[in-house]
Image: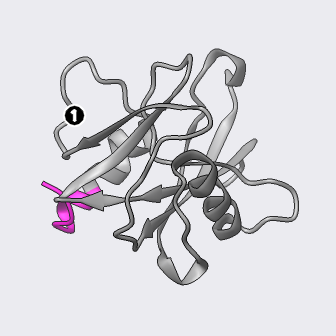
Amino acid sequence: MNDQYDIYKAAGIIIKDRRLLVTRSKDKDVFVAPGGKIETGETPEQALIRELKEELQLDVSAHNLKKFGTFYAEAAGSHNAGQRLRMDVFIVDSTRPVTPDNEIEELLWISSTIPDGLNVGSIFAHEVLPKLKTQRLID
């Protein structure tokens, strides 16, 4: 697989009642797992810890994160046309409640079957959700 990329992000898998949390930012129509771009000098774990706090008021530490995989895809959105995305994905071990904050407008808990009309980011729709289902972590 080509491991060249233009954008580097970290994302968190939060599961409750065998459903995966996805979020939608204000003025966006795509649901994605919580997380975001890795800033200069940050590790993927540090970026995810920061993003979980900013987006969901969720405090976790590195010991709450378990690497799930690294995935590549074409970046979504017209401003990212032709760019390649690398996403390091972690399972977040936390039972604390999540509260949308900052740019998050909507939260959904989904199973491996994406409802008709729901736009979920490609890495999660095509790679992460099926892997979670195969590992029997979600319905």
In the rendered image, the vertical position of residue 6 relative to residue 93, given as above or below: above
Q: Position of residue 132 (x, y in %)?
A: 26, 60
Please name the residue shown 29% across and 23% down the image: 118
Residue 10 visible: no
Magenta includes 135?
Answer: yes
Please indicate whether residue 9 sits to the left or right of residue 96 in the image: right
In the rendered image, the vertical position of residue 55 relative to residue 30, given as above or below: below
Residue that lies at the very extreme toward the left in this rendered image: 139
Residue that lies at the very extreme toward the bottom in this rendered image: 63
Residue 65 visible: yes
Give whichever of 44, 94 is nearer the camera.
94
Please name the residue shown 43% across and 38% down the image: 23
The stretch in magenta equals 131-139
Q: Position of residue 51 (x, y in %)?
A: 63, 53
Q: Position of residue 4 (x, y in %)?
A: 71, 50
Q: How many marks?
A: 1
Disc 1 target residue: 114
Where the C terminus falls, by quadrant? bottom left
Q: Quadrant of residue 74?
A: top right
Q: Position of residue 45 (x, y in %)?
A: 64, 69
Residue that lies at the very extreme toward the right in this rendered image: 40
Q: Quadrant of residue 96?
A: bottom left
| Disc 1 element | loop
Please indicate whether residue 134 sits to the left or right of residue 61 in the image: left
Give whichever of 57, 5 is nearer the camera.
57
Please name the residue shown 16% across and 66% down the image: 136
In the rendered image, the vertical position of residue 120 relative to residue 57, given as above or below: above
Please name the residue shown 57% across and 27% down the image: 76
Magenta includes 59?
Answer: no
What amino acid does circle 1 point to?
Ile
